[in-house]
Image (tube, rainbow, N blue to C red):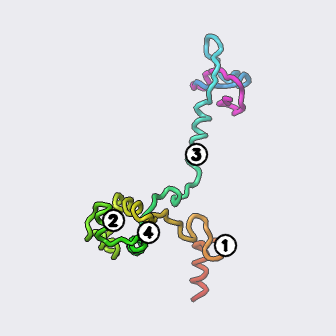
Amino acid sequence: MPSCEMCGKEFPSLRRAVIEGTTMSVCGNCVKFGVEQAGPKVEVTGRSQTTQALERRAVRGKPRDIYDQMQEELVEDYGERVKQARQRAGLSIEDLGKAINERVSNLANIEKGTYHPPDALVAKLEKALDVKLKEKPEAPSGIGGRPVGNAGAKELTLGDLIKKQLEKK
């Protein structure tokens, strides 16, 4: 239901009026503050521009957790995971290279952890060896309103750090 741009109350229909040089969608009570536009009553059935702007502002003002938006990243121990999965499958590096059409030297360097594989190769390895090599990163404790240490502990502030420094002196 649209709301009056003057008083903010919601009404099933509004009228157009020129108030202080601005054309506004107002209710019957607020029309008296300006000059109603000539012609038949103009009924506004949609939301006013003011209401739409306020709704957009409310969406923009919501805090966002950047860790929720992060993509999956390659795990730190990807080389060890690939090696263990290959051995569980009973494959040699050469057999795995033939199966996924990849160089043996690249696979050996991946297992050593010296070669950071591209996303396409990671997908091939995950599918061929049935292993998970990418995970979504977790937010470190103490960031994003999460307490440090004990779950019931309060967050550490700059004031707390200053007090600790002064206590040490």
Q: In this view, does 70 lie to the left or right of 41?
A: left
Q: Which mark is residue 59?
A: 3
- Residue 111 lies, in percent from the top left, at 35, 74
Q: Which mark is residue 75?
A: 4
Does residue 67 show up magenta in the picture?
no
Query: Mark 4 or 3, which is nearer the eye?
Result: 4
- Tag 3's secondary structure? helix
Q: Residue 137 carries which label?
A: none
- Residue 165 lies, in percent from the top left, at 57, 83
For the residues labelled 3 and 2, say whether their Cβ atoms are less than 8 Å apart: no
The residue pinned by badge 2 equals 117
8, 56: nearer the viewer:
56
Q: Quadrant of the C terminus?
A: bottom right
At 61% from the left and 16% from the top, the residue drawn is: 37
Sooner in the amino-acid sequence: mark 3 or mark 2: 3
Q: How far apart are marks 4 and 3 (CA)?
A: 34 Å
51, 73: nearer the viewer:
73
At 58% from the left and 45% from the top, the residue drawn is: 59
Q: How far apart are marks 2 and 4 (CA)?
A: 11 Å
The residue under label 3 is which amino acid type?
A: Val
Q: How far apart are marks 4 and 1 (CA)?
A: 26 Å
- Tag 4's secondary structure? loop
The residue under label 4 is which amino acid type?
A: Val
